[in-house]
Amino acid sequence: MKLLLFVLFVYTYATSAQYRQAMEDLNDDNFGQTLLETIQMHIQSDEPVGNLVNMLQNLQSQVEKVQTKSEEQHKRISTNCYINLGQLNDQIDNYKIKSVTLKSYIETLNPNVKQSVAMVERKQKEIDDYKQELKQAAQKREKEHETYNNILDNLEQALFGFHQIKQAFNQFIDSVQKGQRKFESFVEMKQILKQVKHTYKLEGYKHFVQLLQSLSKQTSEEEALKLAIQLSTILKQIESYIQTERTREDQADLSRETAYNDYKAQIADLLNEASKSLTEMTGILDSQSNELKQSENEKKEVDVRLQNKMKEFDNIQAECSILDQEYQQSTKQRNQQTKLLDQAILLTTTSLGQLKNDLLKHAEVY
C-alpha cells in the first residue's frame, strides 16, 4: 500500500513538472501562444476534444511535410552548391596555373626581345656606317675627279698654248733664217709666252725664258741661231712633259676610279649582307614582339577571367551560405514547432482539465 502511494506521488509530481514545463515552453514562443489561443477557442466551443487533437496532429503533419520538402530542397541546393563551387574552384585553379605559366613565359620572352632589339640596333648602326662610308668615299672620289679635271684642263690649255708658241717660234726661226726678220724681235716671243698663263708652273719654263732673254741680247747671228735651236729643243721637251703629265694623270685617275669601284663594290657587298641580316633579325624581333604581346594580352584576359571566377565563387559561396543559414533557421523553427505541437497534444490528451482551468483563468485576467 505504501509502495502504491509512493508511485502515485512520483507520477503526479512528474506529471505536474512536465505540465509546468510544457506551459512555460508554449508561453515563451509566439507559435506556442498561438497554439494555446487555438486550444482555448476549441475548449470554449462545444467541439469534441478529438477534433482539437486531430487538428493539432494535422498541423504537426503539415510541419513535418514542410520540413521534409525543405530537407529535400536543401539537399538539392547543397549538391548544386557543391558541384558549382567545385567546378568554379577547378576553373580558378586552372586559370591560376595558366596565369603563372604565362607570367613565366613572358619573363622568358622579355630578355629575348631586349636582346633582339639590341642586335637590330647594332646591325642598323652597322648599315648606317656602311652608307656613311660609301657617301664619304663618293664625296672623296668626286673631289679627286674634280681635281683631275682641273689638272687635265690646265694641261690641255698648256699644251694648246705651247703648240701656238711652238708654231710661232718655228715660223719666226724660219723667217729669220730666210732673212725676213731680225733676232732683236725675240722680245716679241717673250710677250707671246707671257700670254700663255698656264705655262708658268711647267718645268723648263724658267730656263726657257732665261734663254729667250739671252737670245734677245745677242748681237751675233750665229750665237743667236744656236740659242734659237736650243730653245726649239726645250719647247719639244716641255711639250713632251705636258703629254707625259697628261698620261700620268689619266692613269692615276683611272687607278683611283678602279680603287673606288672596288671599294664601293666591297662595301656594297657588306651592306647587302648586313641588310639581309637586318631583315632576318627584324623578322625574328617582330615574331618575338608579337608573341610577347599576345602572351601579355592572353595573361591579362586570363587574369580578368580569374578575378571574375573568384568573384563568382565568392558570390555563390555567400548565396549558398545564406541559403544554408535560412534552412538551418527554418529547420530549427520547425523543430521547435514540432516540439510545441507534441507538448500541446500531450496537454490536451493528459491534462485537459487543468489546461482548461488555466486557460479560463488566463482569459479572466485579460
Image (cartoon, helix red, strand yellow):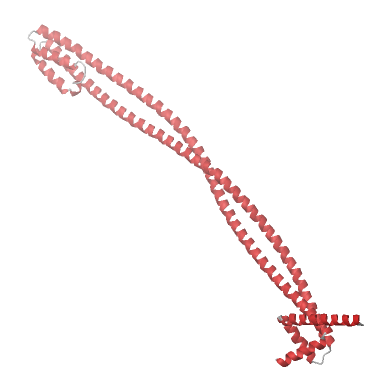
Q: Nearer the viewer, residue 46 or 27?
A: 27
**Quadrant location of the C terminus in the rendered image:** bottom right
- The image quarter containing residue 246 is top left
The furthest residue to the top: 222
Going 68% across and 58% down the picture, which residue do you hit? 87
The answer to whether residue 182 of the structure is visible from this angle is no
Rendered location of residue 349, percent (x, y): 84, 84
The furthest residue to the front: 2
Rendered view: 134 above or below 282: above
Rendered location of residue 44, percent (x, y): 78, 92
The furthest residue to the right: 1
- The image quarter containing residue 182 is top left
Going 73% across and 93% down the picture, which residue do you hit? 364
Rendered location of residue 199, percent (x, y): 19, 21
- The image quarter containing residue 161 is top left
Going 41% across and 36% down the picture, which residue do you hit? 128
Q: Nearer the viewer, residue 250 or 94?
A: 94
Rendered location of residue 322, percent (x, y): 66, 68
Q: Disc count in the image?
A: 0
**Quadrant location of the N terminus in the rendered image:** bottom right
Seen in the image, is 166 located left or right of residue 19? left
The answer to whether residue 24 of the structure is visible from this angle is yes
Rendered view: 252 above or below 89: above
Q: Nearer the viewer, residue 96 or 304?
A: 96
Q: Nearer the viewer, residue 361 or 69?
A: 361
Rendered view: 346 above or below 199: below
Going 74% across and 66% down the picture, which residue do you hit? 76
Rendered view: 158 above or below 215: below
Seen in the image, is 292 located left or right of residue 156? right
